[in-house]
Amino acid sequence: MTNKQLSTKHLLGIKYITRDDINLIFETTDQFKEVINRPIKKVPSLRDITVANLFFENSTRTRISFELAEKRLSADIVNFSASSSSVSKGETLLDTVNNILSMKVDMIVMRHPAPGAHMFLSRHIDANIINAGDGTHEHPTQALLDAYSIRERLGSVKGKKVVIVGDIKHSRVALSNIYCLNKLGAEVKLCGPPTLIPKHIESLGVTVEYNLRKALEWCDVANVLRIQLERQQTKYFPSLREYSMHYGLSRQVLNTLSKPIVIMHPGPINRGVEITSDLADSEHSIILQQVENGVAVRMAALYLLADKRD
Ligand code: CP
């Protein structure tokens, strides 16, 4: 493994890391991908390190992926769900975390509905923190595994054209992808109903296209997002049927393009809404490769951050 180090002791967001950090995570991921494809998938790199996985919001992929990554690095693990904890009795986030840390926990992986929750914690505790999603703000390991999957499929990220389609307004995946792809030299376009594209988003170095077909004709890769109904307090479009008619990806739409494109989705998929079932499962899709890469990317992030412990 490398002697190089990350510039930071936490992974709070892609905004707060450098291009060199991302490339170091990718180089390390390459090595861990080789490890997890061996018959014995475990290495002792995080032996004697204890990681707490604190999930204050639901998760399937991220939670399982982190847990597998930690186990394959031989870390000790404790898991916490807000629904079955004393949070429901009124305990604050800081009290909850400090109580867990007093049991000698070294690293925290946390998903929380409040944007900035991880930044707040990082000012009060010494343990390394990895953001596994904070509300509508960032989901850095998702963006890293997305960019890593583009690099794997297309050879590099630099110069590639990536369109992110869907509910940009409520998506932490979109924001982290924008930061990550920009840092790696890709061109980024956003596509969706005007009500789901934040005003002034161009200031982040992206362009906007409201016509799905034009956006797809432009791109090499389409990263398709689901509509986050759980974060929407108002109606942003008339019905899911109409959303699907205008912004849903299907084989029929792809067949009208002048070249093949790569289809990505961070999951969970709402089949038949933002993407048809046959396209999600087609040769164009790298959705399950993204999930597979997630374990190695998270192993790399955990390994490199453990090296930054005080
Ligand atoms: N992509 C993602 O964050 O999925 P989960 O919500 O299942 O973790």
Image (cartoon, rainbow, N blue to C red):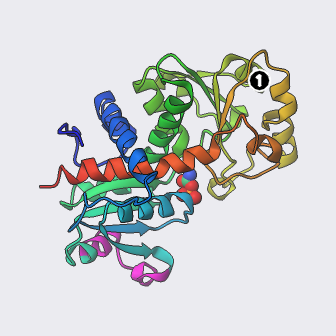
Residue 116 visible at all: no
Residue drawn at (50%, 21%) of the image: 186
Secondary structure character of the magenta stretch overall: helix
Q: In this view, does 152 lie above or below 272?
A: above
Q: In which quarter of the image is the C terminus?
A: bottom left
Residue drawn at (59%, 34%) of the image: 198
Q: Name the residue under label 1.
A: 211
Residue 309 visible at all: yes
Indicate the position of residue 82 as horizontal and vertical percent values: 46, 74
Residue drawn at (48%, 23%) of the image: 156
Circle 1 residues within 10 Å: few <14, some 14–19, many ≥20: few
Q: Does the segment drawn in magenta span residue 93?
A: yes
Furthest residue in direction front, as rendered: 39
Q: Which of 237 and 266 is in front in this view?
A: 266
Q: Which of 254 and 187 is in front in this view?
A: 254
Q: Is residue 169 above or below residue 217?
A: below
Lateral position of residue 247 relative to residue 61, left or right? right
Indicate the position of residue 92 as horizontal and vertical percent values: 34, 73
Q: Quadrant of the N terminus?
A: top left
Q: Is mark 1 within 8 Å of ligand 1?
A: no
Residue drawn at (55%, 25%) of the image: 154
Specify start and end residues of the magenta stretch as a single range. Answer: 84-98
Picture quadrant where residue 91 is located: bottom left
Picture quadrant where residue 71 is located: bottom left
